[in-house]
Image: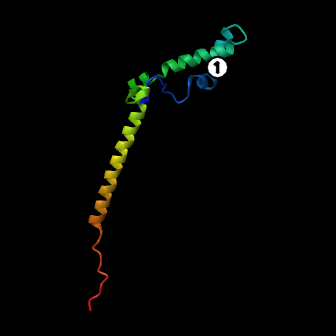
Amino acid sequence: MAVEGSYASVIGGAPAAAVVFARDVRQRAAELTGDDAQVRATAELAARFDGIHTVERAREVGSIDDIIPPERLRPYVVGVLDADRTRLGEQAAAASTEHTLSAPPSRSTTTER
C-alpha cells in the first residue's frame, strides 16, 4: 500500500543524484553555464529519478498492492490494525483451546481417609 502522490524509492531523487549519480551530475554541470550549474544539474537528475520512481510504477511492477488517497490513510490503517487484532485474538483463543485439550488430567490434591 502506498499513499497517492508519494514516491516508491529507497532513496529520494536529490540524495540519489548527489551520491549514486554524482558522475552524471558532474557531467551535466559541465554542460551548463553559471555559478549554480551544479545545483541545477542535481535538480534535473533528481526530478528525472523521482519521475521514474512513482507509486504507480511500483504498483505496475508488483512492488506494492494498492494506492490510496491521503484522506483514506487513517481508516485504512485502523482497518488493518483491527483485522490483525481479531486474527491474533482468534489465534490466541485457538492456542488456549489446544493447550487445554492437550494438557494431562490434573491429579486430585485431596487424599482419601
| Residue at far bottom of view | 113
Give the image location of residue 19, x and y in percent. Answer: 63, 26
Is the residue 104 above or below the residue 34 in the image? below
Q: Which residue is more in the foreground, 112 or 23?
A: 112
Look at 67% across and 8% down and name the residue there.
32
Which quadrant of the rendered structure holds the C terminus? bottom left
Look at 73% across and 11% down and name the residue there.
35
Q: Is residue 65 left or right of residue 40?
A: left
Give the image location of residue 42, x and y in percent. Answer: 63, 17
Q: Which residue is more in the foreground, 31 or 54?
A: 54
Is the residue 39 above or below the residue 72 in the image? above
Asked whether residue 100 is in view, the answer is yes
Q: How many marks?
A: 1
Q: Is residue 113 left or right of residue 81?
A: left
Give the image location of residue 30, x and y in percent. Answer: 68, 11
Q: Which residue is more in the foreground, 32 or 67?
A: 67
Q: Is residue 76 left or right of residue 113?
A: right
Callout 1 amino acid: Arg
Q: Which residue is more in the foreground, 36 or 4?
A: 4
Q: Could you say which quadrant of the image residue 58 lies in?
A: top left
Q: Is residue 96 left or right of residue 4?
A: left
Residue, disc 1: 23
Look at 55% across and 17% down and name the residue there.
47
Give the image location of residue 14, x and y in percent. Answer: 60, 22
Q: Could you say which quadrant of the image residue 83 lies in?
A: top left
Which quadrant of the rendered structure holds the N terminus? top left
SS label for mark 1: helix
